[in-house]
Amino acid sequence: MEPINWHSFFFLLFGALTAVFAVAVVVTSNVVRMAFYLILSLGATAGLFFLAGADFVGAMQLMIYVGGTLVLLIFGVMLTAQGPFISMKTGGGEWVLATIIGGALLGLLVKTAFSVEDWQGPAAVAHVEGEEEHAAALPAQSPTSAPIGLGLLGVRTDKLDPAKAELAPGMAGYLLPFEIVSVHLLVVLVGAAYLARTKKRREA
Amino acid sequence: MDLLTQPVGVAHFMAVGAVLFVAGAVCMATKRNALGVLMGIELVLNGANLNFVALGSEYLRRDTALSLGADGNLIALFVIVLAAAEAAVALAITLNFYNNHSTVDVDRADDLRG
Amino acid sequence: MAEFFIETCGFPGWLGYLVTGIIQCVILIHVPLVGAMFFVWVERKVSARIQDRLGPTRCGGKFGWLQLLADGVKLLNKEDLMPADADKMLFRLAPYVSFCASFAAMIALPFSDGWVVQRMDAGVFFILAVLGLEVFGVILAGYASASKWSLFGAMREAAQVVSYEVPMGMCVVVPVVIAGSMDLVTIANKQAGLFTNWYLFHDPFTFIIFWVYFTCGTASVNRAPFDLAEAESELVAGFHTEYSGFRWLIFYMAEYGSMFIVAGLASILFFGGWNGPIPIADWLGLSYAPGATDWQWQGFLGNLLGCLNFVFKAIVGVTVMIWVRWTLPRLRIDQVMTTCLKYCTPLAAICFLLATLWTLSGVPFINDIAPRGVETATAEPEEPPAPPAVAALDTPSEER
Amino acid sequence: MDDQVLGDNLWQLLRAAWLLPLVSFTIIVFGGKRLGKAGVLAGYLATGAIVGAFVLSMTAFGLWLNAYGVPKLEHHGGEHHAQAVSSGGVFSLVKFQEEAATEEHHASSTAHAGTPHYHAGEWYRLAQFGNLRASISYHIDALTVCMFCMVTLIASCIHFYAMGYMHDELHDITDHEVHLRDGHHLHRPGRYYRFFQYLSLFCFSMLGLVIAGNALMVFVFWELVGVCSYFLIGFYIERKSASNAANKAFIVNRVGDFGMLIGLMALWGSLGTFDFAASDLDHDGAIAQNEKGIFDLLRDPANGFALAPADGMVAAAAAADPEVQAAPTAENIQNWRAQGYGYWLLVIAGIGIFCGCVGKSAQFPLHVWLPDAMEGPTPVSALVHSATMVAAGVYLVGRFYPAFAPEALLVIAYVGAITLFLAATIAITATDIKRVLAYSTVSQLGYMMLSLGIGGWIGGMFHLFTHAFFKSLLFMCSGSVIHATHTNEMPKMGGLRKKMPWTAYTMLVGCLAIAGAGLPFAIFGWHIGLSGYYSKDSIVMHSLWYGDVMPRHAWLAFMPAIGAAITAFYMFRLWFMTFAGKPRDHHIYDHAHESPPIMYVPLVVLSVFAVGVAWTMPFTGLSLDGLLDSARWPGTNPAEVLGLSGVVDPHQYHGMATIVAFSTAIAGITLAAVFYGWGYLNPEDARRQFAPIYTFLRNKWYFDELYDFLFVRPTHFIAARVANLDKKWIDGLIDTLARGTKGLANLDDVIDRYFVDGLVNAVAHWTMSTGLALRGVQTGRLRQYVMFIVVGTVALFVMISFYASRA
């Protein structure tokens, strides 16, 4: 019995949670429970991010998605949650159709994902140091937020290291997209506020 | 079984991402509640995000030189932010729709039907 | 700690991590449990004093030490009620959701130099994010208990928390920018030395920012005067109207736990964490030799003192919250929003801008005069201070 | 005991088993009504005969095992299957035995080098034309023995069952489905004895078909089986539907048999023999050239049993070619064979014989007769149309397997795959309980054909046996239900579980078996399941393998998996609709009752076999597939028979196959449960959603209409034309002149209206119609749009994976 690789174990755990709750979102008809399962699913996804070594993205996922977006969503649910809308049923035929097509899509995606040999996972190492490596592979030991922050400022430090010489050309920073996105966000918020305001009945 | 003893790879993350994506698509296709459709969209975006992060990760592939590096994380960040924006607008639209039609059933939103 | 088990005790790797995790959980779980008991006792005493009463006196000793233990036992024995048309599953889950949130936030909260369950590179954000999850427990509770009071409470809570996360985030970013790292341990270590090194006194704007942060923190854990979610005057008890007994108790533990976390975060970001006003421990040599990796009793003692120091600061913060609660009247919901959007946010934004400029423009600040500077690029007075992110690049090098 | 005594005992036992039903048939024919009261003894007589046959067959089975030991199935493919069981393949012969053959001219011989054990010989030679012997001969190998046991066992069960089922026929009965002119129902005497007489005749012919040692004898009994089927389908001859169905079955079978005749002629004309395998006829202890069988000629042991057209074929084909003038000397024949002469003759022979099987076992173009054959009494459906007769086609393909060229196998595979899918889809919408089972039979036969066609000989034969057991079980259960409710319509049933528990649960066993239920733990090295699980497993395994080694026909590989899902779905749809839920028709429900023990005891017996027939017997290692494999002719393992070389071993796909088969089956069962068991979803919704598909399937893909249009109508049409031909000739002359003038007058009008106006109108109309057509797309339904997007994505993926990856 070879020792269990805990990185993989936690991946399986979080992956299973993510998938199960995602499916739960689909099959539940009560919209509030849908929101709840969605939260759990996205939280587990954040866990997967941490496992993939992207702790900043994971924290962002928790903060913006789970903290912000979903609160908005639940807010909307509560604003519109009246008897008939809490749970809306869908016809059996549509379910079957969607299930068949979705199943086909799923099969194709998974098949495609596993068809690339380089993605099958890191080269299997002997298990003892393999465990060390994956213990070390836990995100906390690798600073990721600083390169990301610099990347947003237009400097790509992660492309400086000689290990990835072939990536060095095109030190593409993300300053402009960053600005665009921030302005876009501002516009969006104003627009949302405008859209969502209740119309005043003005006569004449 | 050897999933427990072998290190997982990008493909495994992508499999989970695929589940998320398909779940989201089916959710969009089957829910009549506009907010349900919104949640489906969130699921789809997360599936895509998972792929970006996995591709950007250093630990998940044989040849780490090929990984997207910080690009993966950055794109994932943009996706998250834009998803937030999208959620805000979509929510506003939904509320507006609810004010005018007093329902959130997307099947009733077919005023422009040909 | 895991290294201790694996290398010193020779455990197999996974067992080492397992034992470490269990021990750390057991230690941490006392913060919300014992902490809640202690803080409730403090709250009752303080409120009593403020209202010119005595508060609990009888139960156990002359200060009513054991009053809260008695309360706990009473709560455990209470009947567990659930409204008939509640959403059973969500009703049951809600308290645990908010408790888990505030408990999980402690994973990244360092109690002393290196005394942290999981040292994260984005620790600050992790704590903020996970604390933000606490609101879900409240919202679900409000929805699930199928009572309009609870629903109103929950919606207020949602609006309040979402909007207060914005200025709070800005305030938190300021120390991050100054320290050039989001790792809480690094941030705190950069404030070592005299109390003049605390970021509170780093420049006028951080001084202002701290108060904004504290206000927002108070609001985000919905304590008075921002406790609109449980305003007993208009909503019977807000989101936990329908709760009783153990579930209600769990809500309270979550609330006090997150109070502690917010206060602790404040003490790390602005009050130098475990670095006392006067670095006695350092002068006594009670610290790890730089670059030392093995276990040394001086270092352990120093960390222990630091931990006490940190906890003391946190308790002071909580006490201030309590004091505020029993002093100020509760705001109206629109006033709460006004406070957030019209005052806190612009103030935080401006201070954030100015503090960043201050840091970038090489104004020599008080840290440089300090006897024992911080060994980073920012500490060298002659060369212009590097932009924060660049400083962040070599944070790994200065880990002990 | 040594080989020759064994051979004699075997053929004596099996001949007795074969002739016993004939005896009972003869007695009943002459005895008729006089046997006991209203011929009640006929039932006992026929039953006794078939039971005796069963006992004899089991004895022969025991002898066989005792002589050749328990064959082990080695999962490596390859040739040593045969070696493993053929005692090193020593050349051995049976000396002529005077006392064994009394009045008939008899000979026997056993396997020679490399071939599996078989005993072939001749009982009676009807005639001899040159080299061609028309004789009553036998060919006994493991397959024959197993078939004997299977047929006799099922037949005995069904005889017992029929004694209960046909009980009404003992006295005069009024047929409520036949309306006479005077409005009354038909009143006729019972035909109990006749039913059993037909059954006996059928058993006799089936067993003869199995034991037959040459193709001619096979053909004779083949037709006998067809006749019996005709009698039995038309048992209620007064019913219009019944007689029509009987005619349909008979005629459709003739169509197939025509092809079979062609195949037989091709073989005879080119090979000069009908025998399957060599047998030493003149007892000189050696196999002369004219004693060789078809298989020996086509697969010469000299060059490793590789399939090659025999000399006769090459010569015949070359002689038919005008360019070739040379005389058929040995080296000429070699050259011609090298040039490919005679190969297509071989292919044609294979396809021709397969045509017969298409008719008999209701494959794709000729599948229309089987569902209508359900007009016969249910025991007939169980015996004739599920277990034995339709299986005869598959049996023949399996028997002739060494003679099939890869091209012929490809045809078989395609026909099988089409049948499998088509019948399964039709079964989804059928509401007549027996028709569902009939279509499922067709679909399962398609499974077997597909498996044989893609080289999975074991899979096909294996499925033939397991399917025989659970399908006869299912039919008898449905018969018991019909017996209790007096209706075939499932929508009128429901909730019968409480009324008739024995039937319900035996049928559940059958459904699980046909759905291939089991625990898919092959990944951990062990797995256990019902019989259908193993056979379906083997088929899916071979199909996956086939999909990889033959990428151009890869879609065949998906068929078994899809079919498994659909099978599970409609079988459990049937079970849930019949036995679960609330009773839909209380009148029927209240009158329903459990059948008498004589009817449900056979069910229990059969269900035991349906569970365990495919298991490897503990302590002995005896397994059905092992036995069958020991009968496989050398040179016919999957790779070789497809003419491939250096490909992977199919058994590598076993793990995946188990997972695939299991998951698809579970998916089907779950879907059925969701619709009909738990009622989460309403079938009506699905019907509305897929309305066009539903009607299409509901009308059985419009096959009857199609044939009506293709064959029946034209006949009438031509007849009518011929009838009034001369009238047209006479009138035509004058009419032409008048029409000419009129046409001339109309011409410019036509030009003006159609060409000038038409041009303008066409443009306008085209624009209009385009607009209207596009308008429909804008349904304004968000979810529909999402669905379009997803479908587009899937299609894109598929296209890329098919084309981009091939490049």
Image (cartoon, rainbow, N blue to C red):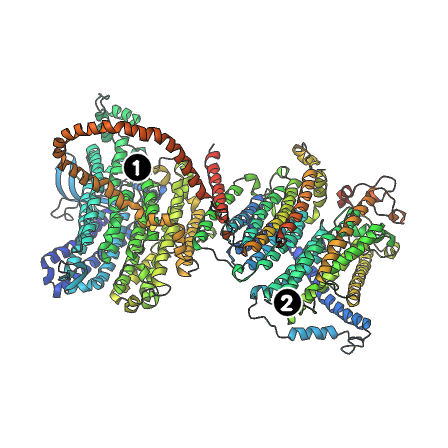
The three-letter code of the residue at mark 1 reads Ala
Between residues D721 and D215, which one lies in front from this camera angle?
D721
Query: Where residue D455 sits: x, y (%)?
Result: 35, 41
Mark 1 neighbour class, 10 Å CA radius: few under 14, some 14 to 19, many 20 or more: many
Q: Is A9 displayed left or right of D192 in the figure? A: right
Q: Is C362 displayed left or right of D525 in the figure? A: right
User: Looking at this rendering, what residue extends furthest in the bottom direction?
Assistant: C58
Nearest-to-viewer mark from 2 and 1 = 2
Q: How many marks?
A: 2
Residue that numbered label 1 is attached to: D408
Q: Determine the residue positioned at 68% across, 74% down.
A: C73
Q: Determine the residue positioned at 19% across, 49% down.
A: D225
Marks 2,1: beta carbons within 8 A: no
Between residues D149 and D244, which one lies in front from this camera angle?
D244
Query: Where residue D207 sits: x, y (%)?
Result: 21, 50
Query: Where residue B33 sits: x, y (%)?
Result: 53, 55
Query: Which element carries disc 2, helix, strand or loop?
Result: helix
| Labels 2 and 1 positioned on one and the same chain | no
Residue that numbered label 2 is attached to: C149
Q: Is D141 displayed left or right of D786 in the figure? A: left
- Residue C280, by quadrant, is bottom right
Q: CA distance from mark 2 to mark 1?
A: 78 Å
In the image, which disc is placed on residue D329?
none
Query: Which element carries disc 1, helix, strand or loop?
Result: helix
Whether D105 is drawn above or below D301: the answer is below
Residue D309 visible here: no
